[in-house]
């Protein structure tokens, strides 16, 4: 005789069909009892996933008085009988307190005696199996509600292997069937189901096999739930899913069908409310530490001092995990010295790259390390190049992703693949916004982590000299634009691997790429070690590069820094020994050899002292062509306002104001008479590709100030003493 298989539930006899508020006591159906059914279901749960599990004790929860507005908006949604959507996605970067918000909601729901189920994913603790998500939730519901428990008994009777089936079939049997066809929970207050940290849900496979499976499993969970709430809006189940804004989750929640099923609440990292909440948390924690160590901390004076508190609050900038990591380090009972621990925290905040015994940010570093470990090994080299770019290139206007990728020669598809695991720590623009919205680090602590070789385990430097690689990319761009014997760079020659369709946007992007390449070249030229890419430097036409900055309207400070790097290189004798730079007395510069077929540049600053730093205040930036002076005050939108400018002949479209002196050469001759022994620098490997760079500082009464003496003079001279700095960059045929 063939084996008999009982019909699947829903098709065979249904002992409790349409049962409501059914209570079973001491009953047996076949070999299944309520207790044995729960026991069988309990074998398919993820231990420790509940909000009140001892494995999570003490759990993260919202500090009193914090996250009030977010929690209140969610509670209003829970209590709204006319709510349009039954699914909420709570998303935010790593370490902003999403789990604390979910914990707080779960605890308040428990106190109200409502039916709820919670699942706190944790890859570190093994709570991440997608095949046990719905069984874990079902077990909690069965424990709390007799009618649902009765349904589970029937399910175990008719289909003992139901819990071993695929996830979509589990969802059908454990949620669709009981809540839609059986009407369980009907007429009652809504049941709340919370899933925290969905991005940590992944199959128990090796990493190389599980990445795509993890994303598919996470998206399938969202699809099952979103479809359920769309098709059955009257079912009294409310779902909250929290996660980091990973790229695949953002994309899936943006799908038309899923978007219609949910509403979204973002937990920002640096909003005013977040910063105030973190400050409130810090003050409370410091007070607890003071009470814990009454013999260490005097009650007669405030602790910590307000300036120290402000330092920590500014460093946290709304980042709860940073604040929690710091206070736990200071409170550490194994050390038992909060004053010394606080001093270490202040040291690491002031200098995040300094080695200190007992890293105060160990827990935070572990979080960042775990995020980086999720990057696919095949895309990891590109990820490192992009992160290195944003670590090394810190000028605001160079932070567009399209600029970075065209500098690094990384296509759009490869860029988003390389960044897909970093949405928890980076604000990555949508492709439609890359022309205007920059890529940004969500918190400075991640930048500090990457810059510290010790803390990041040499993450950015493990594949060689990243700075050198970026510099070579800048050389590639400059060589495309700087054409020998042309008076100005031809920006249209720059090739774009990620190119906008709009022609004016394409031209503007080429300008930005050139400007960034010039900054990279100047910033890193001083760090090039001996024997590295000398031929690349020798092939640059420095007499032509000057004109590129006029086309772009670059800030005079950035422009001047390009040439300043040659004045004080990392290896002072390297460029000179290879004929790339040579020193010359200003009085020996032959004005007859200053070329009139190139652009020359002059910048003037007023210098002042701000703490331990010298501040430069640009007064004017002037470009000279054929002894005709062109002048303008730098405007960040300069390029955007001149979309029709001809890159080959920018002066045809540029009008300036009359300068305060007749010609640039007159000013140079005056400085030669006043300071004939001042040092100038000739930059360039051959007479036809060179320029002469000169910088002089002088007081309001005409006294020459050596560069190394500027700081001390500003500090020692009476108030009102002014020092002016002039910078000349002149195309020079020596």
Image (tube, rainbow, N blue to C red):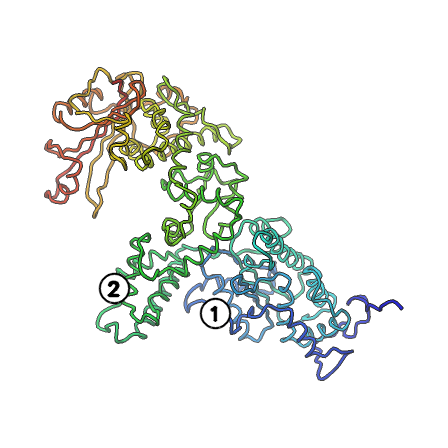
Q: Mark 2 or mark 1: which is in front?
A: 1
Vertical relation: 335 (above or below) 217: below
Left/right of residue 34 with respect to residue 140 in the rendered view: right
Q: Quadrant of the N terminus?
A: bottom right
The C terminus, quarter of image = top left
| Extreme-bottom residue of the structure | 26
Mark 2 and mark 1 lie on one chain; the one further toward the N terminus is 1
Residue 9 horizontal/vertical position (percent) = 77, 67
With 422 as the anchor, is 216 left or right in this view?
right
* Residue at mark 2: 305
Q: CA distance from mark 2 to mark 1?
A: 30 Å
Residue 190 visible:
no
Residue 338 higher or lower than 197, as above or below: below
Residue 698, visible in the rendered structure: yes
Position of residue 400 in the picture relative to residue 673 (left or right): right
- The image quarter containing residue 436 is top left
Which residue has dot 1 on it? 59
Q: Nearer the viewer, residue 375 or 178?
A: 375
Q: Give whichever of 254, 472 is nearer the camera.
A: 472
């Amino acid at each position: 005789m063939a084996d008999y298989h009982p019909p699947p539930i829903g098709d065979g006899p249904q002992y409790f069909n349409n049962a409501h508020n059914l209570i079973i006591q001491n009953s047996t159906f076949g070999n299944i009892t309520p207790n044995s059914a729960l026991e069988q279901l309990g074998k398919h749960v993820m231990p420790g996933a509940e909000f009140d599990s001892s494995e999570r004790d003490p759990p993260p929860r919202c500090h009193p008085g914090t996250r009030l507005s977010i929690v209140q908006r969610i509670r209003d949604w829970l209590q709204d009988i006319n709510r349009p959507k039954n699914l909420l996605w709570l998303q935010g970067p790593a370490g902003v307190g999403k789990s604390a918000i979910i914990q707080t909601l779960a605890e308040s729901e428990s106190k109200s005696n409502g039916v709820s189920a919670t699942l706190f994913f944790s890859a570190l603790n093994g709570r991440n199996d997608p095949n046990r998500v719905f069984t874990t939730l079902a077990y909690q519901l069965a424990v709390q509600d007799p009618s649902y428990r009765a349904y589970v008994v029937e399910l175990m009777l008719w289909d003992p292997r139901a819990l071993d089936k695929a996830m979509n079939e589990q969802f059908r049997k454990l949620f669709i069937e009981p809540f839609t066809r059986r009407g369980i929970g009907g007429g009652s207050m809504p049941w709340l189901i919370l899933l925290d940290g969905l991005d940590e849900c992944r199959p128990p496979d090796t990493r190389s096999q599980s990445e795509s499976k993890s994303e598919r499993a996470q998206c399938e969970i969202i699809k099952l739930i979103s479809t359920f709430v769309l098709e059955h809006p009257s079912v009294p189940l409310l779902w909250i899913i929290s996660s980091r804004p990973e790229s695949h989750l953002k994309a899936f929640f943006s799908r038309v069908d899923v978007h219609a099923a949910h509403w979204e609440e973002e937990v920002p990292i640096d909003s005013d409310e977040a910063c105030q909440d973190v400050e409130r948390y810090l003050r409370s924690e410091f007070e607890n530490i003071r009470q814990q160590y009454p013999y260490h901390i005097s009650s007669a004076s405030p602790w910590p001092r307000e300036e120290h508190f402000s330092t920590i609050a500014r460093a946290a900038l709304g980042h709860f995990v940073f604040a929690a990591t710091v206070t736990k380090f200071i409170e550490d009972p194994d050390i038992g010295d909060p004053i010394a621990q606080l001093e270490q925290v202040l040291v690491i905040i002031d200098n995040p790259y300094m080695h200190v015994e007992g890293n105060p940010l160990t827990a935070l570093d572990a979080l960042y390390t775990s995020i980086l470990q999720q990057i696919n090994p095949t895309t990891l080299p590109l990820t490192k190049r992009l992160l290195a770019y944003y670590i090394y290139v810190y000028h605001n206007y160079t932070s567009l992703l399209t600029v970075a990728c065209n500098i690094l020669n990384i296509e759009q598809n490869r860029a988003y693949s390389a960044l897909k695991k970093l949405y928890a720590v980076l604000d990555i623009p949508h492709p439609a916004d890359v022309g205007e919205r920059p890529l940004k680090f969500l918190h400075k602590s991640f930048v500090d982590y990457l810059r510290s070789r010790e803390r990041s385990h040499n993450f950015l430097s493990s594949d060689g000299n990243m700075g050198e690689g970026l510099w070579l990319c800048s050389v590639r761009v400059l060589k495309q634009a700087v054409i020998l014997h042309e008076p100005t760079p031809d920006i249209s020659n720059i090739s774009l691997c990620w190119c906008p369709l709009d022609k004016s946007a394409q031209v503007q992007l080429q300008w930005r790429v050139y400007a960034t390449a010039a900054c990279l070249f100047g910033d890193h030229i001083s760090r090039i070690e001996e024997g590295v890419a000398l031929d690349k430097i020798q092939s640059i036409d420095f007499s032509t590069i000057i004109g590129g900055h006029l086309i772009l309207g670059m800030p005079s400070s950035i422009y001047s820094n390009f040439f300043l790097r040659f004045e004080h290189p990392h290896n002072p004798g390297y460029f000179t020994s290879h004929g790339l730079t040579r020193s010359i007395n200003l009085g020996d510069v032959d004005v007859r050899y200053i070329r009139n077929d190139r652009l020359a540049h002059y910048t003037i600053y007023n210098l002042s002292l701000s703490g331990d730093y010298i501040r430069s205040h640009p007064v004017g930036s002037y470009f000279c062509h054929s002894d005709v002076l062109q002048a303008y005050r730098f405007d960040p939108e300069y390029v955007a306002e001149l979309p029709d400018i001809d890159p080959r002949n920018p002066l045809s479209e540029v009008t300036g104001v009359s300068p305060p002196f007749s010609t640039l050469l007159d000013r140079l001759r005056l400085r030669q008479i006043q300071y004939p022994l001042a040092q100038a620098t000739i930059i360039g490997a051959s007479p036809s590709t060179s320029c002469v760079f000169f910088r002089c500082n002088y007081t309001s009464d005409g006294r020459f100030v050596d560069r190394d003496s500027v700081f001390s003079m500003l500090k020692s001279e009476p108030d009102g003493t002014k020092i002016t700095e002039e910078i000349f960059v002149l195309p020079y045929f020596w």
